Image (cartoon, grey):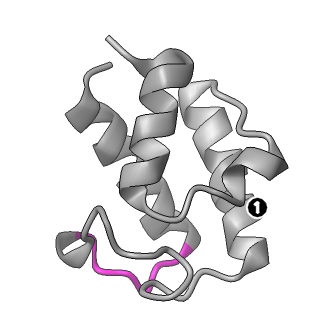
Amino acid sequence: MNRQEIRDAVIDELVNVAPDIDRAEVEDEKSLRDEYDLDSMDSVNLAIAIHRRLGVSIPDSEFARLQSVQDLVNYLQTHGCGE
């Protein structure tokens, strides 16, 4: 997958977990917790959804450090989804 495909998949799953988010307004560098109001349960659901869709597990300790869509895409590119 290329970077754009990974980004699209992450945003798809983000919107599935938090349907109040407008996908057209998602900015890659914004905080998932602060800007998009993801709580801890939403974060767990997002990690599970990403694993199911992309086949990459993100350990809890790593996921806690991934604060934005950009962080998630970077992580996924270097852990199995890169070209």
Residue 22 spot, x, y in % from top left: 28, 80
Relative to 71, does residue 24 appear above or below in the rendering? below
Q: Quadrant of the C terminus?
A: top left
Q: How many marks?
A: 1
**Residue that appears at 54% across and 88% down:** 37
Residue 42 spot, x, y in % from top left: 68, 73
Q: Main secondary structure of the magenta part?
A: loop
Residue 8 spot, x, y in % from top left: 29, 46
What residue would you read off at disc 1? 44
**Residue that appears at 65% across and 57% down:** 65
**Residue that appears at 72% across and 32% down:** 57
Residue 17 spot, x, y in % from top left: 57, 69
Residue 29 location, quadrant: bottom left
**Residue that appears at 50% across and 88% down:** 34
Where does the magenta region start and end? 18-23
Is the residue marked by circle 1 packed among few (<14), some (14-19), or many (20+) residues within 10 Å? some
Relative to 53, does residue 55 appear above or below in the rendering? above
